Amino acid sequence: MNDVNNSGQTTTRTIQEKPQRSRFTAVIVVVFGLCALAGLAWYLSHRNAKDGPAGGGNRARPSATVAFAVVKRADVPLNLQALGTVEPLAVATVRPQVSGVLAEIFYQEGQMVKRGDPLVEIDPRPFRLALEQSRGQLLRDQAELANARVILERDRMLLTQDSIATQEVETQAATVAQLEAAVAADRASVGTAQLNLNYSKVTAPISGRVGLRPVDLGNYVSTGDSTGVATITQISPIDVTFSLPSDSVSAVQQRVSSGATLPTLVLDRTRVNKLAQGTFLTLDNQIDTQTGTIKAKARFENDKGQLFPNQFVNVQVELDTVSNALVVPASAIRHGPKGEFVYVIAQDKTAHVRDIKTGPATDEYTSVTAGLNVGDRVVTEGGDRLTDGSQVRLPGQGGSRQAGSSSKEGAGAASTAGQVRGKQNASGEGGGQRAASGDRGKGRRQNAEPADAG
């Protein structure tokens, strides 16, 4: 009984110790695995830092390919930029001078007409009849006047013979004067009738482009119609009105007073296409106090009709020209805390910062008043990747680019190989850990089995 009791107590203690040893083994395996992962992470991070650009303290910084331009001398125009509106010299709404029914329309919508060209014709028959009536009245009064003059000459002869009273002679003389006045009025009536007949055919008062037709054939038109029978807009020559800053008034007035002609260029809204070239005409007589600007006007021949009335355009007035100035492309100018600067490429193909002072500029070039010399090479593209003293590659150096790409490919291959080796090492270490853990677990199970068997 004691042996049995002792044996039973031993078996019970072994069964109670088995779960405790299993939990202890699992904790050891987890801790060991975490340590292995931490070591692997430390190795990979230090290896990447060592292989990367920042970790390679002895490796040279890679050069950058840049585009450059050579500093040269050129004439730089001093331009005044403004936004303008195209305005025609004259706009005529053609209204008839007589009333009547439209018998003919001679123009087409949008047609170019010259001064004196026929536009429409009002039925001329009533005006011809009125002209004939006036002429008949004139002939009748002229005949009466001729008869009165004959009587007056006879009466004067009789008066010299003392055969007639003086009063009768004076009365006949008054009748002749009255008939002369009637004949003059008849001549005026004939002229009016002839003028109305001429007005029945409406002609263009100015040269220009005809707009849309406001009337149709057979419509009755009168002198009081507000729309008229046609609208003509003069487009050649044509003006452009724009506003200039009040600060430029003195400079413009000085140039105009000296007799200089200010070339004026008109561009479209995109400032790409040139529409017309003309000359500056005049300034307004006062400055607008609300906007601080003054209105100005320029005139253009507009032979090709590229300027259209009420069109918005960009105006460029060439005020003066700076001759023989140092110029660089506008893309080469950079801005820093100390002001404007450029990257100058030295003979050893290194880029150095050069502080400059700029002057007047155009859309493509900027003049430089200090800091550069003729023949200096300045970086125009790729300057964002440069610092003072950076090595650069110039366009056309294919070997340098190939060498750079080869080195990059080699670095990328080495980095990839290092990552693969790291994965392989991590797999080996993990396999060893799993094997060691398995061996230890197997040993524990083998140690526990005799106890169970016992």
Image: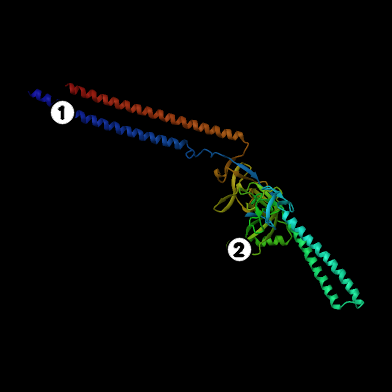
- Which numbered mark, 2 or 1, is in the foreground of this view? 2
- Residue 20 screen position, x and y as percent: 21, 31
Distance of mark 2 from mark 1, alpha carbons? 109 Å
In the drawing, does residue 333 fall left or right of residue 140? left
Q: Nearer the viewer, residue 107 or 70?
A: 107
The residue where tag 1 is placed is 13
For mark 2, give the secondary structure: loop
Please, is residue 437 above or below residue 260 in the view?
above
Counting labels gives: 2
Q: Nearer the viewer, residue 273 or 1?
A: 273
Quadrant placement of the C terminus: top left
In the drawing, does residue 425 fall left or right of residue 324? left
In the drawing, does residue 311 fall left or right of residue 27? right
Q: Nearer the viewer, residue 295 or 399?
A: 295
- Amino acid, disc 2: Asp
Q: Residue furthest front?
A: 163
Name the N-terminal-most of marks 2 and 1: 1
Please, is residue 145 above or below residue 309 in the view?
below
For mark 1, give the secondary structure: helix
The residue where tag 2 is placed is 288
Residue 183 falls in image quadrant: bottom right
Say which mark, if any, is on residue 120: none
Mark 2, other Cα within 10 Å: few <14 / some 14–19 / many ≥20: some
> Is residue 197 visible to the viewer in this orientation of the structure?
no
- Residue 362 screen position, x and y as percent: 64, 51
Quadrant placement of the N terminus: top left
- Residue 314 screen position, x and y as percent: 63, 52
